[in-house]
Image: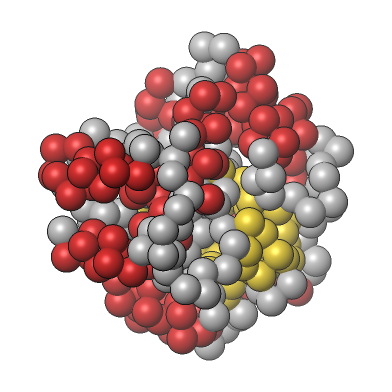
Amino acid sequence: MADREGSSTAGAAATFAIGGGLVVNRLGFGAMRLTGRGIMGEPGAPEEARRVLRRAVELGVNLIDTADSYGPEVSERLISEALYPYPEDLVVATKGGYTRPGGRWVPDGRPEHLREACEGSLRRLKVDRIDLYQFHTPDPRVPFEYSVWALALLRDEGKIRHVGLSNVGVRELEIALDIVPVVSVQNRYNLTDRASEAVIQACEREEVGFIPWFPLATGRLARLLRPLDEMAARRDATPSQVALAWLLAHSPVMLPIPGTSSVSHLEENVAAAALKLTEDEVATLDRS
């Protein structure tokens, strides 16, 4: 059990209001790994996948992130099978803009594709409106503005409540904000990959949530960050828990979504929300 004692970082709120109105606990759940190997096809144990989702909600997780490309379609369907009708405070965020021919990840930011993808997500999730719909990745064959305008139109039509972006830089965020209110950015970010630091700072200025994907840098933390192991040992925590606690302390707009297909691993991750690092501990990891 992680140690909760010590002088913690000050003022770290446990919740964040996405778009100013959707209040979520800052530690969410990423549903990508509930699918088969390579994020393709059905999971080997579908009932266990549904049990993970139900347990996440029981533990207070009320932000679940998915995408139509996970499976494809499998992750969204599992979510509706496990959780529909949804708890009133649950935010299911999904994404469109990738296709999976032959298991590859191929961007498709054409407005017609994004509309079709959104309609498919609405059906699979069994909702009339998606709380947070994110453009999964810019498509080099399609002007970025065209893709964002497609989501703006879907928002105007009431099919999505809020617009988010994924895999973008500061410039793309600025372009999108001139077209439609943007409430979240989802980029790769963790202790070993901080390339999106400038994007986080822009999100803080604009009060936009930042959703780090690959937040635990699976397999790399133990190899690269000796201070993490030492800190975890002192705190009677796991290195993964400390890494998640660092993310939460690093920025007030940070919304980590660690994913897993295991109930026990899920419970370990969620417990990290209660681990408050000291300012010295945060500074040590910042320098690592």
Q: Is residue 269 toward the left or the right of residue 76 in the image?
A: left
Residue 181 at what x, y percent from top left? 61, 80
Q: Is residue 258 toward the left or the right of residue 232 in the image?
A: right
Residue 203 at what x, y percent from top left? 45, 77
Residue in the image at 61% along x and 17% along y:
48
- Quadrant in which the C terminus appears: bottom left
Residue 124 visible in the snapshot: no
Where 42 sits versus 250, above or below? above
Residue 21 at what x, y percent from top left? 74, 72
Query: Which residue is nearer to you in this view: 230 or 222?
Result: 230
Query: Which residue is nearer to you in this view: 36 or 203?
Result: 203
Mark count: 0
Residue 169 at what x, y percent from top left? 34, 72
Quadrant in the rendering for residue 51: top right
Quadrant in the rendering for residue 279: bottom left
Quadrant in the rendering for residue 249: bottom left
Where 227 sits versus 177, above or below? above
Residue in the image at 52% along x and 12% along y:
44
Query: Which residue is nearer to you in this view: 156 or 263?
Result: 263
Residue 229 visible in the snapshot: yes
Where 93 sits versus 71, above or below? below
Query: Which residue is nearer to you in this view: 121 or 106?
Result: 121
Residue in the image at 55% along x and 37% along y:
31
Direction front: furthest residue: 6
Q: Is residue 101 toward the left or the right of residue 279 in the image?
A: right
